[in-house]
Amino acid sequence: MMKFTPTWESGFIIKGKDDERNIYFVSKVNATSGRFRKVGLDQIKLDPNQN
């Protein structure tokens, strides 16, 4: 099972269990619907308020 790590107010970062490179950003909207969006490390470092 994936561990939830709270980050920005807008959502969570989820790291894959077996591969640290599998990183997902989950917004509150996506979390309620169960959808995950995979992002790269460079994307995570961006300002979370940018769209």
Image (cartoon, helix red, strand yellow):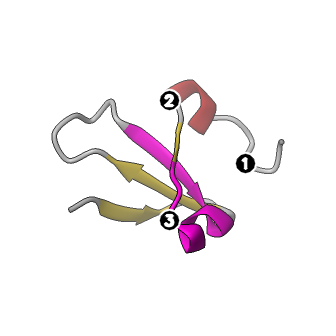
Q: Residue at coordinates 51% horizontally, 51% vertically from top-left?
A: 36
The residues bearing labels 3 and 1 have C-alpha atoms spaced at a distance of 20 Å
What residue span does the magenta drawing correspond to? 23-36
Q: Name the spot of residue 11 as percent of width and height, x first.
A: 60, 62
Left of 33 or right of it: where is 29? right
The residues bearing labels 2 and 1 have C-alpha atoms spaced at a distance of 13 Å
Which callout, 2 or 1, points at the residue further toward the start of the chain?
2
Q: Name the spot of residue 28 as percent of width and height, x first.
A: 63, 69
Task: Name which residue type carries label 2.
Answer: Leu
Q: For the N terminus, which image quadrant? A: bottom left
Q: Name the spot of residue 16 as percent of width and height, x first.
A: 28, 44
User: Disc 3 on helix, strand or loop?
Assistant: loop
Residue 29 seen in the figure: yes
The correct choice, above or below, for 28 with respect to 39 in the image is below
Which callout, 3 or 2, points at the residue further toward the start of the chain?
3
3 vs 1, front mark: 3
> Circle 2 is placed at which residue position?
41
Left of 7 or right of it: where is 3? left
Residue 9 seen in the figure: no
The residues bearing labels 3 and 2 have C-alpha atoms spaced at a distance of 22 Å
Q: Residue furthest bottom?
A: 32
Q: For the C terminus, which image quadrant? A: top right
Q: Residue at coordinates 40% horizontally, 53% vertically from top-left?
A: 14
In the image shown, does 20 or 37 lie closer to the viewer?
37
> Circle 3 is placed at which residue position?
34
Q: Badge 3: how crowded within 10 Å, few (<14), some, or many (20+)? A: few
Q: Name the spot of residue 18 as percent of width and height, x first.
A: 16, 40
- Whether residue 33 is in magenta: the answer is yes
Which callout, 3 or 1, points at the residue further toward the start of the chain?
3
The correct choice, above or below, for 6 with respect to 44 in the image is below
